[in-house]
Image (cartoon, helix red, strand yellow):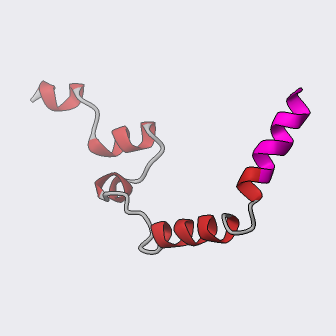
């Protein structure tokens, strides 16, 4: 019987971690289109040569 009072309740643990109990149970999922959008951004950047120019500019500034 005393063992029940010695351990913190589940609610108390959640308050200590500043998260709601339902939040702890959910597995974080990324957005469905996250990889696709990242690839599109890279594809838009690449044909303009911004990556190569950015490297040339940054290396010129560091000299």
* Residue 28 versus residue 63 in the image, above or below: below
- The answer to which of 1 and 25 lies nearer the viewer is 25
In the image, residue 56 lies in the stretch drawn in magenta: yes
Q: Residue at x 31, y 59 (%)?
A: 26
Horizontal side of 2 relative to 25 (left or right) equals left
What x and y, as percent, mark residue 50? Answer: 76, 58
Residue positioned most to the left: 1
Asked where in the image residue 46 lies, by quadrant, the reply is bottom right
Kindly report the secondary structure that dominates the magenta region of the rendered protein.
helix
Q: Nearer the viewer, residue 12 or 39?
A: 39
What quarter of the picture does the N terminus occupy? top left
Q: Nearer the viewer, residue 18 or 60?
A: 60
In the image, residue 6 sits, relative to residue 55, either above or below, namely: above
Residue 44 position, x and y percent, is 66, 71
Residue drawn at (46%, 74%) of the image = 33
> Quarter-wise, where is residue 3 in the image?
top left
Is 41 on the left-hand or right-hand side of 2?
right
Residue 32 drawn above or below residue 4: below
For the point 49% across and 68% down, which residue is it?
Answer: 34
Residue at the image point whose x is 43% and y is 42% from the top: 15
Q: Is residue 43 left or right of residue 33?
A: right
Quadrant into which the C terminus falls: top right
What are the residue bounds of the magenta stretch?
A: 53-63
């Amino acid at each position: 019987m005393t063992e029940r009072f010695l351990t913190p309740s589940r609610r108390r643990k959640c308050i200590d971690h500043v998260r709601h109990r339902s939040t702890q149970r959910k597995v974080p999922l990324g957005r469905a289109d996250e990889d696709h959008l990242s690839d599109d951004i890279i594809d838009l950047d690449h044909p303009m040569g911004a990556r190569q120019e950015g490297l040339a500019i940054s290396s010129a500034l560091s000299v």
